[in-house]
Image (tube, coloured by chain):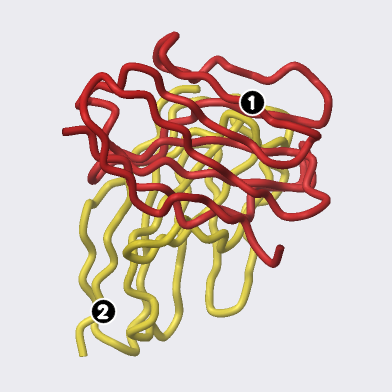
Chain colours: A yellow, B red
């Protein structure tokens, strides 16, 4: 797949604030997107996904927004907590909703300051 | 098991030696993936197994890399004649199949080639 990138390698927010992590993708054929959270020493953990027929999807304290016009994806985390500190990856695929050959971005390290 | 299990957690090997990395997927998951994560980088797709179909090997970086999946369950990733650039964390993931998302990663095997 084509590259998927993130705007910021590190994002620092105050505990309790909302955070927004951004991701840009280049493959206009991408139709399925996932956000992952990876804590130190652990494998990536699925957070939330969205298909290209949607522009917003909400989970528990997280919201993913998809703007297909500008090929931009964002993850919003409400009321950040210390446990939210991790590296966040976006991933995309054009496999018709399948997960084979997911292309991952390099990740944004979210730091929660007390 | 309750999650995707990988072994060993850490492996240090001498350049030129062969290594085998093991992945036990979640029971009942028909899809199994191997990814490689270099320091500070995103995940690089290596190989994908889906049921009894021929695996998608398009991500394997060289013919020194191979993988098998026996009985539709356990998978072994083999790296022959290891090189220093093979040093990375090797992650395995499983899912219920295409279109079901990629939600479950193992903790990874950290390979160091000295």
Q: Residue at x 32, y 73 (%)?
A: A85
Above or below: residue A22 compared with residue B68: below
Above or below: residue A92 compared with residue B105: above
Q: For this rendering, which residue is in front, B74 or A25?
A: B74
Q: Residue at x 50, y 42 (%)?
A: A91
Disc sitting over residue A112 in the figure: 2
Disc sitting over residue A2 in the figure: none
In space, the residues marked 2 and 1 are separated at their CA atoms by 41 Å
Estimate how packed mark 1 is, as few (under 14), some (14 to 19) or many (20 or more) residues with alpha carbons within 10 Å.
some
Q: Quadrant of residue B27?
A: bottom right
Q: Quadrant of residue A82?
A: bottom left
Circle 2: element type: strand
Above or below: residue B58 compared with residue A56: above
Task: Tell me if A56 is positioned left or right of B31 in this view.
Answer: left
Q: Residue at x 58, y 56 (%)?
A: B5
Q: Position of residue B63 (x, y in %)?
A: 44, 9
Q: Position of residue A79 (x, y in %)?
A: 41, 86
Disc sitting over residue B68 in the figure: 1
Q: Residue at x 26, y 42 (%)?
A: B12
Q: Position of residue B90 (x, y in %)?
A: 42, 40
């Amino acid at each position: 797949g084509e590259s998927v990138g993130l705007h910021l390698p590190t994002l620092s927010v105050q505990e309790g604030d909302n955070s927004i992590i951004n991701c840009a993708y280049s493959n206009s054929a991408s139709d399925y997107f996932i956000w992952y959270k990876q804590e130190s020493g652990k494998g990536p953990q699925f957070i939330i996904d969205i298909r290209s027929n949607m522009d917003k999807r909400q989970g528990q304290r997280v919201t993913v927004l998809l703007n297909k016009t500008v090929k931009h994806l964002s993850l919003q985390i409400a009321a950040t907590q210390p446990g939210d500190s991790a590296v966040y990856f976006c991933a995309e695929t054009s496999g018709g909703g399948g997960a084979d050959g997911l292309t991952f971005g390099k990740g944004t390290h979210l730091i929660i300051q007390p | 098991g309750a999650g995707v299990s990988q072994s060993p957690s850490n492996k240090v090997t001498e350049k030129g030696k062969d290594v085998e990395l093991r992945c036990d997927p979640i029971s009942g998951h028909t899809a199994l993936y191997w990814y490689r994560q270099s320091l500070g980088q995103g995940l690089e797709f290596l190989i994908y197994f889906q049921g009894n179909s021929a695996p998608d090997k398009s991500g394997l970086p060289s013919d020194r890399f191979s993988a098998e999946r026996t009985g539709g369950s356990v998978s072994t990733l083999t790296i022959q004649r290891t090189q220093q650039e093979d040093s990375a964390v090797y992650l395995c993931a499983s899912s219920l199949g295409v279109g079901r998302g990629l939600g479950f990663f193992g903790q990874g095997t950290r390979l160091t080639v000295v």
